Amino acid sequence: MLTNTPPPPAATPLPPTPPLPRRIKLRLQRAYLDWKGPRRERQWLYSWPFINSVEGWMTLGQERWLFEAAYSLASPANIVEIGSFKGRSTVALASGCRGRRKRVFSIDTFDGGGWDLDQRDFFAEFSENVKRCRVSQHVTVLRGKSTDVASGWSRPIHMLFIDGCHEYEAAKADFDCYFPHVVPGGIVAFHDVNEDWPGVLRLWNETVRDRLVDVGDCHSLAHGRKRKR
């Protein structure tokens, strides 16, 4: 006996998959690179959310440059940072030191100095940022005027990053005090080398640039290496 069998119901199409939130994408990227990928990239992807959570005035890409420069140094290494504000550049540098015998010496009064920074007393916020970003073990704070700290400095410097007072005489004093301690081939970098800060730009063009090799820039972050004897 023949029967009329009803056709099966039509399949209901599934709704399109919504895009993953950015934080989930970053977690998946980290998980993949933890399993398969270069250590440097894994370290950067882990560090970037921490770096980006800290207030500061870096131009896009400069944090990555600082991380890469610190990462590239042979261990052990001493990195001197003059001018830290609330720690954005400090965390970028220290993130490139993870797992190695490298240290960032952060030199700042942490009170603005009355020159080109109006904010005052941000040491507590700096300290909290360094701790929260999990780089405390790679950061040594030397609180005071950079020229005063220099009078007791005796360590070799493998990377010097100057981002303190932007007045010509003050920036020149920082360079004159610390450059003799930079090892041959060591990295020297200045932030805000542009027309907005004529003192820094003048110092770079008149004094610093000709004493370095492999000179380049990352936006307003100018850099090079100390000539080898």
Image (tube, rainbow, N blue to C red):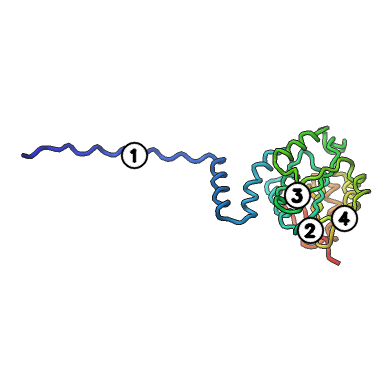
At label 3, counting other C-alpha atoms closer than 10 Å, the crowd grade (few under 14, some 14-19, many 20 or more) is: some
Instruction: Name the residue carrying label 2.
Output: 224
Q: Is residue 130 visible?
A: yes
Label 4 vs 1, first from the N-terminus: 1
In the foreground, 115 or 63: 63
Q: Amino acid at mark 3?
A: Ser
In this view, the mark in front (3 or 4)? 4
> What is the CA distance from the residue labelled 1 to the residue labelled 2?
59 Å
Label 1 vs 3, first from the N-terminus: 1
Residue at x-position 76% and y-position 50%: 221
Where's residue 155, x and y in %? 87, 54
Where's residue 222, x and y in %? 77, 53
In this view, the mark in front (2 or 3)? 2
Q: Amino acid at mark 4?
A: Phe
Instruction: Name the residue carrying label 1.
Output: 13
Q: Which mark is residue 42?
A: none
